[in-house]
Amino acid sequence: MSEDSENMREPLHETLQVQRGETEASLQPLRLGERVRSLRLGQGLTLEEASKLTGLARSTLSKIENEQISPTFSVVHKLVNGLGIDLPQLFSEPSNSAQPSGRRDITRRGEGKPHPTATYEHELLATDLSHKKMVPFTTRVRARAFGDFPEWIRHDGEEFLYVLSGAILFYTEFYEPVRLEAGDSAYYDCTMGHMLVSVSEEDAEVLWVTA
């Protein structure tokens, strides 16, 4: 049996069923072959290059793009992994309504909104924008010992931490403390208790981005 014949088994036709635990979602592809070609060309890939990335024969890819065969779920999985995309990207066209909003905010050095606490000296950035998806701010870490904090700091969301200067001990609820120095970074779940302590001679400065 040829590979093309194998790839035509269990065709998706118009609906792809995706099983996740107890739930099942249906994705309705529109001109799947055209979408595959668009994604391939968008990455500047030839059929031969896409074939090597996905592990699918060049002839199979060509037939998919020309709507001559409907790929099986296993072939879809190879396409998604090989092209480095998420499954919904393959089965949905880019929205034409997603127009640039033109939002922009510039914060000059030292012109952020100060927000001092007993342990941190925060400077909030991009404060002129409301409804932001991220909250950026810099912090001078005043705390010098774990005991300077009455309790773990925790809140909703995820957070990116980048050390701008100095050195800190990064405490988290479920991990051993780790020393971070200028240029080091961390990404973590904010619902996990966390706190920073300066261990350099000068107070450390960090950049935080919370989402």
Image (cartoon, rainbow, N blue to C red):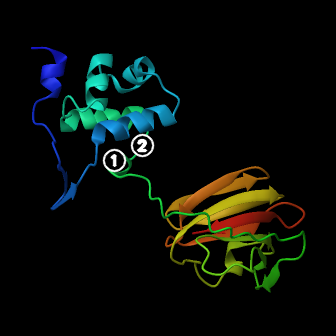
Q: Is residue 207 above or below residue 44?
A: below
- Determine contact: label 1, label 2, CB under 8 Å: yes
For the point 44% across and 32% down, the residue is 40
Q: Is residue 175 left or right of residue 160?
A: left
Q: Secondary structure at mark 2?
A: loop
Q: Secondary structure at mark 1?
A: helix
Where residue 26 appears, as percent x and y from the top left, is: 20, 56
Residue to which mark 1 is pinned: 87
Q: Which amino acid lies under the numbered mark 1 shown in the image of this protein?
A: Leu
Asked whether 159 or 197 is in front, the reply is: 159
Q: Residues within 10 Å of mark 2 (few under 14, many from 20)?
A: few
Dividing the picture into quarters, in which one does residue 124 lie? bottom right
Residue to which mark 2 is pinned: 85
Where residue 130 appears, as percent x and y from the top left, is: 65, 81
Q: Is residue 4 left or right of residue 150?
A: left
For the point 68% across and 67% down, the residue is 102
| Quadrant in which the N terminus is drawn | top left
Q: Is residue 199 above or below residue 72?
A: below
For the point 62% across and 75% down, the residue is 132
Dividing the picture into quarters, in which one does residue 33 lie? top left
Q: Which amino acid lies under the numbered mark 2 shown in the image of this protein?
A: Ile
